[in-house]
Image (cartoon, rainbow, N blue to C red):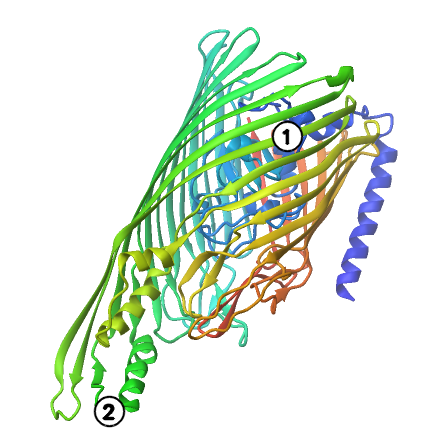
């Protein structure tokens, strides 16, 4: 009753505002075009690779301007969930974990299937995806395989984020805000031209909250957060043809993390401290040369990541497992492109790309007293009891066994790509065909060094005396592999009119292979037991066979278009797709303990459609609706029988962590009063985003049904001041953002509760 009452009340309020505003605004505010309404505050910058503009790109693409991002309260890539059709980026407990799923294609751990570029600089680690969306000029979400132009790990799509240029935007902005749960935020930025050819910008931000979930073990909030950072940019038009841009950004995170509740008790209750801390630095240098009929672009990127994660791996008040992982990553990339800039019937683009990525990870897992008793003492007691005349008696004396692991992962790769577009083919105006091809080479390597030492008292059969013993286990070695891929693409497009077109496309993508590191704690435990029983420890070859996984491949087939049925009033985006995936990489927990690993799971298919509508019935009113359907299932996936598990057939089951559908609807009402009232302008924005059923494991036994969250904001502007009141999940919808099994128990990450607050912005 309450939910229906709130929704009906909101609908009545929106209808009242719409009618009042349309009556009020007719004849007072000029009716802009739909294009101006939706993209008036976007500076459309041409891509460094594409010869098509964003407006006519033959692909499923969603573009968000600064105005859109403010209205939708988008502060991170996770906030775009369901607003973009078939886009899902759930909050899994920390900024470290940022898996993105598009069209049912994604990865909960390991390398991404959706790549992120900020000012054309790539991010190589998903732990760097969840950054503050601060002073953003536009965000592009390209759905579907983009491998030809972007290469590795672009099977699901591409996220492009662009920041402001001080040559196109000037001014100073100050903003401060707060809300419930101890929320506080502040940011400031300044953009200035030094002269007609040079400009610079500086900005900084700070956010904090007290957390949303309580750990019953100590009565404290488990997920409090502090997040700070900044950005500096310098732009120089060296000549009428040559320009250079240098940028530097820094992001710092210190947060409590992993508020995982036992689903049986609905309580978060664990005894080890859990947190996530991150330092992220990104540098970029971009050069652009404009010739008479061509353009050359160079982008050099460097990213430094240093983070630390501590997690109670058993999520209970008992002392089983705790992990303390540290990452230190240096990534260097270089891309050069040359493309045509004329409107000729033939357009072309060539490019070369290279990168080097070095990741050093240390991830000691601490096996504590309760785990020693359960997994080692109980095992050895059982063996002794089964044959006491031959098997000695073991009594473990350690309170903690350190399962130490150190990993060095150097990866490098090079690629060459080309794209040609032939316009007005067969002497048919508006008909074009695009061919693309990319040759991508990558060399990956993992050097591992894992060890563990256990102390115990050994009492041989028939002996009255127990003797102290020490068993040491080491897994040392390296695993490497090469991947050479050819990624073709073909697009046929027909331009119906200046604002409408249709296209059909086929493209191949792949996600790189690699090695599991989070499974080594389990491998060490097995090796320890083998050592205690005087059995052989796995060889380097045997270890490599268990940790390696192969690339994932896909073919993306798509039919879509952009249309404007009612000029300047209604527009629609439509896409129908079929994705055929081979060697699916899927995350699995090992022996139901804390470790997990990536393995290849046969074949899968994702098929569905996307629909986006934008309407502007009168000045000051804007409405949108998006729907995406993704039927992502295993096409052929059968596990093999092991000593402790039977073979299982998961064929036709849904791919876990990929929602079946996404839905969003929202609108904006605004009016300019031209100083007739105490305020100059007001804007009311609201949006509702819904997520369809999400399955949590390959067996599809547990899932989260459809849920939706309602957000709204009201801003009042007067001169240089803007006061905003906002709310997120204002119906306080209870839902599970993440669920998993560990040690035969199920744990869940709840979605954030209702939040509200206010902010004051000053534009100078």
Which disc is residue 729 wearing? Answer: none
Residue 654: image x %, image y %?
Answer: 63, 59
Residue 467 position in % (x across, y down): 12, 83
Q: What element carries label 2?
A: loop
For label 1, the residue is 490
Q: In this view, does 321 lie to the left or right of 101?
A: left
When asked about the image quadrant of residue 80, the answer is top right
- Left/right placement of residue 455 relative to residue 672 reads left
Tell me where residue 523 appears, x and y as whole percent: 32, 64
| Gap between marks 2 and 1 measured at Cα | 70 Å
Total tally of numbered discs in the picture: 2
Q: Residues within 10 Å of mark 2 (few under 14, many from 20)?
A: some
| Numbered label attached to residue 388 | 2
Near-viewer residue (585 or 137): 585
Q: Residue at x 20, y 86 (%)?
A: 392
Q: In this view, does 380 lie above or below 7?
A: below
Residue 698 seen in render: yes
Looking at the image, can residue 679 be seen? no
Q: Is mark 1 on a helix, strand or loop?
A: strand
Which tag, 2 or 1, sits closer to the chain's start?
2
Quarter-of-image position of residue 679: top right
Report crowding for label 1: few under 14, some 14 to 19, many 20 or more residues within 10 A (C-alpha): some
Quadrant in which the C terminus is drawn: top right
Residue 87 located left or right of residue 199: right
Question: Which residue is found at the position 63% from the left and 45% from the top?
Answer: 579
Which of the two residues, 10 or 118, is positioned nearer the viewer here? 118
Quadrant where the N terminus sits is bottom right
Q: Is residue 157 above or below residue 100?
A: above
Q: Where is residue 569 in the image (x, y as percent from the top left)?
A: 82, 31
């Amino acid at each position: 009753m309450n939910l229906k009452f709130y929704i009906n009340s909101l609908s009545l309020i929106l209808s009242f505002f719409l009618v009042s505003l349309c009556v009020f605004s007719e004849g007072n505010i000029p009716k802009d075009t739909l294009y101006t309404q939706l993209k008036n505050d976007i500076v459309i910058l041409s891509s460094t690779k594409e010869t098509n503009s964003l407006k006519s790109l033959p692909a499923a693409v969603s573009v968000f301007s600064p105005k859109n991002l403010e209205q939708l309260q988008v502060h991170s890539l996770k906030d775009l969930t369901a607003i973009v059709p078939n886009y899902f980026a759930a909050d899994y407990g920390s900024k470290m974990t940022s898996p993105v799923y598009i069209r049912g294609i994604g990865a909960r751990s390991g390398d991404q299937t959706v790549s992120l570029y900020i000012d054309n600089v790539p991010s190589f680690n998903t732990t760097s995806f969840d950054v503050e969306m601060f002073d953003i000029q536009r965000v592009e979400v390209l759905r579907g395989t983009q491998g030809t132009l972007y290469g590795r790990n672009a099977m699901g799509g591409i996220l492009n984020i662009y920041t402001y240029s001080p040559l196109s935007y000037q001014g100073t902005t100050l903003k401060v805000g707060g809300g419930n749960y101890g929320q506080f935020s502040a940011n400031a930025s300044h953009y200035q031209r030094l002269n007609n050819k040079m400009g610079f910008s500086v900005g900084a931000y700070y956010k904090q909250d007290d957390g949303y979930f309580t750990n019953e073990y100590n009565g404290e909030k488990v997920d409090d957060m502090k997040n700070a950072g900044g950005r500096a940019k310098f732009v120089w038009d060296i000549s009428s043809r040559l320009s250079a841009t240098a940028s530097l950004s820094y992001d710092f995170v210190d947060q409590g993390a992993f508020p995982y509740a036992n689903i049986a008790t609905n309580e978060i209750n664990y005894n080890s401290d859990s947190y996530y801390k991150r330092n992220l630095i990104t540098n970029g240098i971009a050069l652009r040369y404009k010739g008479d009929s061509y353009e050359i672009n160079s982008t050099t990127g460097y990213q430094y990541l240093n983070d630390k994660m501590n997690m109670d791996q058993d999520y209970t008040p008992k002392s089983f497992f705790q992990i303390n992982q540290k990452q230190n990553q240096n990534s260097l990339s270089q891309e050069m492109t040359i493309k045509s800039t004329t409107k000729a019937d033939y357009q072309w683009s060539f490019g070369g790309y290279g990168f080097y990525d070095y990741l050093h990870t240390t991830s000691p897992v601490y096996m504590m007293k309760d785990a020693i008793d359960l997994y080692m003492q109980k095992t050895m007691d059982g063996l002794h009891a089964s044959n006491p005349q031959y098997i000695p008696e073991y009594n473990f004396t350690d309170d903690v066994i350190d399962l130490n692991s150190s990993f060095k992962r150097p990866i490098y790769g090079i690629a060459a790509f080309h794209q040609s577009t032939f316009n007005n083919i067969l002497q048919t105006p508006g008909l074009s065909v695009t061919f693309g091809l990319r040759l991508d080479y990558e060399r990956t390597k993992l050097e591992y060094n894992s060890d563990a030492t256990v102390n115990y008292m050994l009492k041989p059969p028939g002996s009255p005396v127990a003797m102290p013993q020490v068993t040491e286990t080491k897994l040392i070695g390296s695993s490497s592999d090469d991947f050479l891929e050819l990624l073709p693409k073909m697009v046929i497009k027909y331009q119906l009119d200046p604002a409408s077109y249709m296209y059909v496309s086929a493209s191949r993508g792949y996600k790189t292979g690699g090695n599991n590191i989070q499974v080594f704690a389990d491998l060490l435990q097995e090796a320890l037991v083998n050592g205690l029983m005087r059995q052989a420890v796995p060889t380097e070859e045997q270890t490599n066979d268990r940790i390696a996984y192969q690339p994932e491949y896909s073919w993306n087939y798509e039919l879509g278009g952009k249309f404007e049925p009612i000029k300047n009033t209604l527009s629609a985006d439509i896409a129908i797709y079929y994705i055929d995936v081979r060697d699916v990489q899927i995350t699995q927990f090992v022996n139901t303990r804390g470790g997990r690993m990536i393995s290849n799971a046969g074949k899968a298919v994702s098929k569905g459609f996307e629909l986006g509508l934008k309407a502007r019935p009168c000045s000051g009113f804007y409405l949108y609706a998006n729907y995406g359907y993704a039927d992502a299932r295993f096409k052929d996936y059968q596990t093999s029988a092991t000593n402790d598990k039977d073979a299982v057939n998961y064929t036709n089951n849904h791919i876990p962590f990929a929602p079946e559908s996404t839905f969003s609807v929202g609108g904006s009402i605004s009016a300019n009063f031209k100083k007739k009232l105490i305020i100059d302008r007001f804007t009311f924005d609201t949006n509702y985003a819904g997520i369809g059923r999400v399955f949590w494991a390959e067996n599809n036994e547990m899932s989260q049904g459809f849920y939706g969250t309602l957000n709204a904001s009201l801003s009042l502007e007067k001169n240089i001041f803007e006061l905003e009141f906002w709310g997120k999940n204002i119906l306080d919808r209870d839902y599970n953002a993440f669920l998993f099994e560990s040690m035969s128990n199920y744990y869940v990450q709840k979605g954030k509760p209702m939040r509200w607050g206010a902010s004051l912005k000053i534009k100078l």
